Amino acid sequence: MGYIFEKEYEVRYYETDFKGKLLLSRLFNYFDDCAIKQSEAIGVGLNFLTQLGASWFLYQWDISIKELPQYGDIVTVKTEPLEFCRFYGTRRFELFLNKNKIIEAFSVWIFLDIAKKKPKRIPSELSKKYGVEKESEQIKHIEIQYQEDFTITRSEQATLINLDTNNHINQAVYIDWVLNSIPIDFIKSNKPDKLKVIYKKETKLDEKVEIFSHIKNNQSFHKIFSPTQNCDLCNVEIYWLPI
């Protein structure tokens, strides 16, 4: 377990959906921002990583949602690095509204050598800064049920505004793509309860992708596929509750 960091956010109108609830992709942005703010606060932020020639790449999410905050709410996000194992790092996030925890997330990250595009062992200096001094022998990974009978539901193209500082498509964009592929009647009558995401390959600028979906009872399964690379870029599993 490492050092805990927290940051307050106000849910802005432009961060909400047609129900006035925080967009799922903006929730991912809150988590990402909070992790970066902690790194900056302890001196291992973006400039430090640039000097190392390395960066953190998000690999997996496992998120439980009691409710999503709405426009005008003041929420607190807490994050804590949990374990480091070779080039893997895990991190927990919690979101509080009126001191009540309404969202909890577990994430897995990969420490990557930018030039070589290969995983790089996490430096001991970095581990100590985060308060995670003992390396774990192994970490928990997230699994998604894979479906065979997917149907293509939408096509998208990566644009300039989708890029992050690693010059690939920001992880939250994939969630927008997935939600855009779900029929609006289903979205209107259900709310997300649990969400799992596995990022497999990066998406480059101007790359065209296809979103395949399969909805069964209270679950939806999605894969974002690249015809250019001929592989899955991201897999998503969502559990829904009726409203």
Image (cartoon, rainbow, N blue to C red):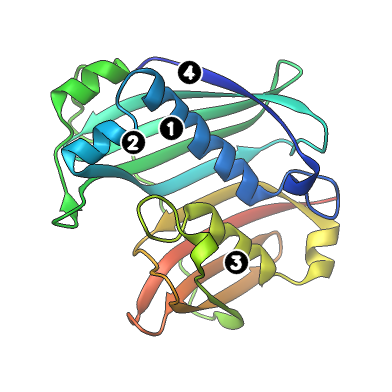
Mark 2 touching mark 4, by CB under 8 A?
A: no
**Disc assigned to residue 36:** 1
Q: Earlier in the sequence, mark 1 or mark 4?
A: 4
Is residue 27 or residue 149 the one in the foreground? 27
How far apart are the alpha carbons under marks 1 and 3? 24 Å
**Disc assigned to residue 162:** none
Q: Secondary structure at mark 4?
A: strand
User: In the rendering, at what x and y percent does residue 226 appear?
Assistant: 41, 78
Mark 1 Cα within 10 Å, few/some/many (few <14, many 20+)? some
Mark 3 touching mark 4, by CB under 8 A?
A: no
Q: Give the residue displayed 51% in from the left and 35% down from the top.
A: 33
Q: Secondary structure at mark 1?
A: helix
Q: Give the residue displayed 13% in from the left and 56% down from the top.
A: 116
Q: Earlier in the sequence, mark 2 or mark 1?
A: 1
Q: Name the amino acid, label 4.
A: Phe
Observer able to see residue 195: yes
How far apart are the alpha carbons under marks 3 and 4? 30 Å
Mark 2 touching mark 1, by CB under 8 A?
A: yes
Q: Which residue is mark 4?
A: 5
How far apart are the alpha carbons under marks 2 and 1? 8 Å
Q: Which residue is mark 3?
A: 177
Specify whether 137 is left or right of 58. left
When the figure is inspected, residue 52 is found, relative to residue 169, above or below; the finding is above
Q: Which residue is mark 2?
A: 46
User: In the rendering, at what x and y percent does residue 113 appear?
Assistant: 18, 48
Q: Name the amino acid, label 2.
A: Leu
